[in-house]
Amino acid sequence: MESGFGSDFGSDFSSGAGGGGKLDPGLIMEQVKVQIAVANAQELLQRMTDKCFRKCIGKPGGALDNSEQKCIAMCMDRYMDAWNTVSRAYNSRLQRERANM
């Protein structure tokens, strides 16, 4: 699934060139971080969509009935809650490990 997120980042890497044609490593790192964040968000959305569709939609049709809409909403809420819980635990662990280094 192709989306509009980050479609023009590749052309921005040379925009940090200052005098003498040198690239700014800080700018490149920030652009890479943004690309990674966008890729992670796209993957999260794709996985959530796939899992909730398989769970909630029995027979795809032209529209979702009321029970399918409720199921999708609840599934997505639970998926995001689980994602946030795991992300917080992961970040907490990373911080503890960095503090012990």
Image (cartoon, rainbow, N blue to C red):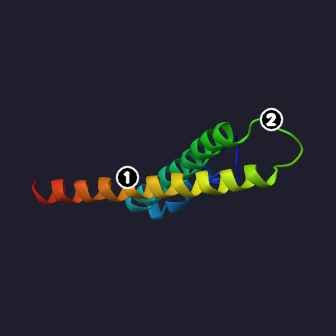
Residue 23 appears in the rendering: no
From the viewer's perspective, is residue 57 above or below residue 20?
above
Residue 39, image x, y percentages: 54, 48
- In the picture, residue 15 is in which quadrant? bottom right
Q: What residue is disc 1 on?
A: 86
Q: Identify residue type, mark 2.
A: Lys
Residue at position x 75%, y 36% from top?
A: 58
Is 41 left, or right, of 28 in this rendering? right
Q: What residue is disc 2 on?
A: 59
Q: Residue furthest left?
A: 100
Is disc 1 surrounded by few (<14), some (14 to 19) or many (20+) residues within 10 Å?
Answer: few
Image quarter in which the C terminus is found:
bottom left
Q: Residue furthest front?
A: 67
From the viewer's perspective, is residue 19 above or below residue 53?
below
- Secondary structure under the numbered disc 1 in the rendered image: helix
Residue at position x 30%, y 56% from top?
A: 89
Residue 44, image x, y percentages: 54, 48
Is disc 2 surrounded by few (<14), some (14 to 19) or many (20+) residues within 10 Å?
Answer: few
Q: Residue furthest right?
A: 62
